[in-house]
Image (cartoon, rainbow, N blue to C red):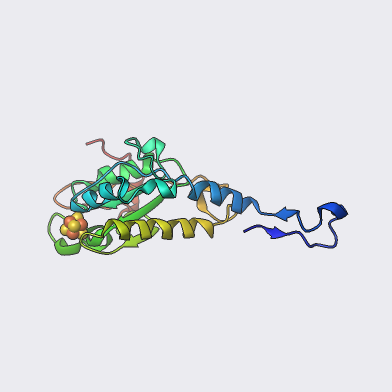
């Protein structure tokens, strides 16, 4: 909530005393961002079904300003990684994330997205999306219920409330770098493990 202005060095007319409120640019930015998060319409496996249920009328994401799910990453600021992340799908997920405008957030929904779940260490599955993307909120469960997803999204709103435009990376002077797209081969290759690969253009395959 805004605070009452009680700084004796700032002159306030007598009739306005007690009524003038102060706020900060951070609060205005954060209020705008947290009240209109646009998730990507994007599901990976069984958890995606619960995500769809959370968006329907019974659980009603619209109550949190998140009812607009967009099929294009260019129009979204939240990617809910809802399901098993296979090595084959991972490069596409990273590309989608890179195509989202900033500020942008990542929610890992379910045991698979958080750490590999029942398929952890499987030959075709990644042990958690956080090995590749900066996850803001983890939602455990197999699958998490729609209520758990809503709780995770409220947690994300609380995180946004605490951010400052002076510190978050997307408002800094330096240009933010895209997340390197892993290369598919006999196994995944993360370009961050090989600096010489990071200098190459990612493959379009
Ligand atoms: S966490 Fe469970 S429900 Fe969710 S995608 Fe993995 S196996 Fe399916």
Please say if 185 is above or below 111: above
- Count of all numbered marks drawn on residues in the image: 0
| Residue closest to the eye, 182 or 148 | 148
Q: Quadrant of the C terminus?
A: top left
Q: Quadrant of the N terminus?
A: bottom right
| Residue closest to the eye, 126 or 42 | 42
On screen, residue 41 versus residue 105, left or right, reads left
Q: Quadrant of ligand 1?
A: bottom left
Please say if 34 is above or below 119: above
| Residue closest to the eye, 18 or 187 | 18
* Residue 146 horizontal/vertical position (percent): 29, 56
User: In which quadrant of the rendered view does residue 133 lie?
Assistant: bottom left
* Residue 85 horizontal/vertical position (percent): 22, 53
Q: Residue at x 13, y 50 (%)?
A: 186
On screen, residue 12 versus residue 138, left or right, reads right
Q: Is residue 99 visible?
A: yes
Q: Residue at x 40, y 36 (%)?
A: 75
* Residue 2 horizontal/vertical position (percent): 66, 57
Q: Residue at x 24, y 48 (%)?
A: 90
On screen, residue 162 versus residue 37, left or right, reads right
* Residue 96 horizontal/vertical position (percent): 32, 41
Q: Is residue 135 visible?
A: no
């Amino acid at each position: 909530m805004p605070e009452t202005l009680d700084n004796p060095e700032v002159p306030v007319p007598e009739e306005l005393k007690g009524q003038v409120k102060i706020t900060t640019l951070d609060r205005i930015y954060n209020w705008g961002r947290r009240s209109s998060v646009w998730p990507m319409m994007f599901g990976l496996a069984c958890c995606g079904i619960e995500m769809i249920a959370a968006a329907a009328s019974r659980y009603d994401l619209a109550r949190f300003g998140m009812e607009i799910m967009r099929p294009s990453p260019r129009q979204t600021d939240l990617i809910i990684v809802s399901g098993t992340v296979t090595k084959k799908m991972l490069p596409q997920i990273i590309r989608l994330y890179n195509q989202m405008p900033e500020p942008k957030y990542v929610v890992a929904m379910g045991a698979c997205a958080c750490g590999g779940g029942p398929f952890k260490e499987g030959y075709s599955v990644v042990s958690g999306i956080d090995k590749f993307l900066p996850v803001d909120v983890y939602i455990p469960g197999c699958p998490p219920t729609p209520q758990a997803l809503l709780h995770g999204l409220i947690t994300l709103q609380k995180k946004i409330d605490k951010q400052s435009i002076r510190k978050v990376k997307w408002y800094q002077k330096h240009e933010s770098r895209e997340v390197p797209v892993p290369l598919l081969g006999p196994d995944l290759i993360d370009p961050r493990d090989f600096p010489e690969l990071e200098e190459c253009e990612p493959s379009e395959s």
